[in-house]
Amino acid sequence: MLFKQQAWLRQKLLVLGSLAIGSLLYLVARVGSLDRLQPICPIEGRFGARGQAEFPLRALQFKRGLLHEFRKGNSSKEQVRLHDLVQQLPKAIIIGVRKGGTRALLEMLNLHPAVVKASQEIHFFDNDENYAKGIEWYRKKMPFSYPQQITIEKSPAYFITEEVPERIYKMNSSIKLLIIVREPTTRAISDYTQVLEGKERKNKTYYKFEKLAIDPNTCEVNTKYKAVRTSIYTKHLERWLKYFPIEQFHIVDGDRLIMEPLPELQLVEKFLNLPPRISQYNLYFNATRGFYCLRFNIIFNKCLAGSKGRIHPEVDPSVITKLRKFFHPFNQKFYQITGRTLNWP
Ligand code: A3P
């Protein structure tokens, strides 16, 4: 009997001890994560007056909790006023490239406490109907943020749409422009895979990639195929350079963002004059997904949707070689203009 009671007591003590240690560990980790994510330094440069832009300590709670309510429209005007919240035009835009990793880049930058993302692609500058609604319409599509935070939106169609550079220039000639690129042939196949999946969902048949990418009459690369044209980055960039100097662009290596996201994100923080706040803690490799996922704090983490990271169909190696040869001179020019060499084949 005594022995039974002792065993019961020991078990109880063990459970209580584990609970106490667990709680302690939780508190330590939580305080640690908050420390890491609370920037005290001002945001320099164009994004705010030097020295006066103290970033509120409430930012983290705000980003994860309140913001959600505001977006859902559950907030009152009083709450918005109380928290000094505003809807700001973007200070930086991810203008492309489609399938370059634009969603991953936006979500990862949103880990930074001074960054607030526009969740949806707004398509203001590339869609005539939206553009005709005016800049106030665009601003009202932006999330609520503190004045010291910066808003970032992404609409990959901007990069390839003729009218967009002039329209963005008219809104803000000193805006910062982010372009995320991947090896052009891989990007074209990724683009094709997305369209193919859409067709399959509607039970439609579609051509093979090889048939679209190579002109059957000439056996040369089919430059009329949109997925090929989009990957000629230098051609599109040249249009943008009629409006913006190269210093206003930052090139993100989308292939490296997949394999090793942190250094790429640190380069973006620098370009945006943001204090470095994204750390290895915020990114963890998820073996099931085969990609890096995001950790905001000890409780909240997420991976990108399944539509990001599709399995590509197999493509005839001779077509891949032909495409790579075709893109090579355009890539060289792209490196030359941007000053970023990406060592694509
Ligand atoms: P694939 O589907 O070809 O693999 P976008 O957001 O511009 O449409 O780009 C989609 C691409 O983002 C995906 O292309 C994927 O490779 C890439 N990507 C980069 N980082 C990712 C991440 N952490 N999780 C999922 N996809 C990521």
Image (spheres, rainbow, N blue to C red):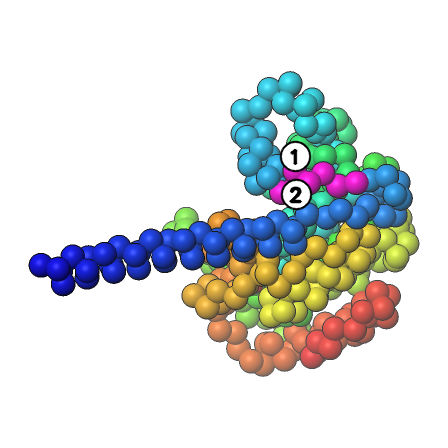
User: In the rendering, at what x and y percent does residue 342 appear?
Assistant: 74, 73
Residue occupied by mark 2? 117
Tag of residue 143: 1
Bin the neighbour count of mark 2 within 10 Å (Cα to Cα): few under 14, some 14-19, many 20 and up: many
The quarter of the picture where residue 266 lies is bottom right
Q: Assess whether residue 58 is covered by the magenta stretch.
A: yes
At 81% across and 56% down in the image, what residue appears? 271
Query: Which amino acid lies under the numbered mark 2 shown in the image of this protein?
Result: Lys
Dot 1 crowding, Cα within 10 Å, few <14, some 14–19, many 20+: many
The answer to whether residue 213 is seen in the rendering is: no
Residue drawn 75% across the image and 41% down it? 55
In this orientation, which residue lies closer to the viewer: 170 or 132?
170
Label 1 near ligand 1 (CB < 8 Å):
no
The magenta-colored residue range is 54-60
On screen, residue 167 above or below 16: above
Which of the 4 image quarters holds residue 231? bottom right
The numbered mark, 2 or 1, whose residue comes first in the sequence reads 2
Label 1: which secondary element? loop
Give residue 168's position: percent from left, percent from top.
Answer: 81, 41
> Mark 2: which secondary structure?
strand
Whether residue 279 is situated above or below residue 170 in the rendered picture: below
Query: Which residue is at a point 72% across and 38% down the rendered structure image?
Result: 56
Identity of the residue drawn at 55% across and 30% down = 69
Provide the major secondary structure of the magenta segment.
loop
Q: Position of residue 42 (x, y in %)?
A: 81, 45
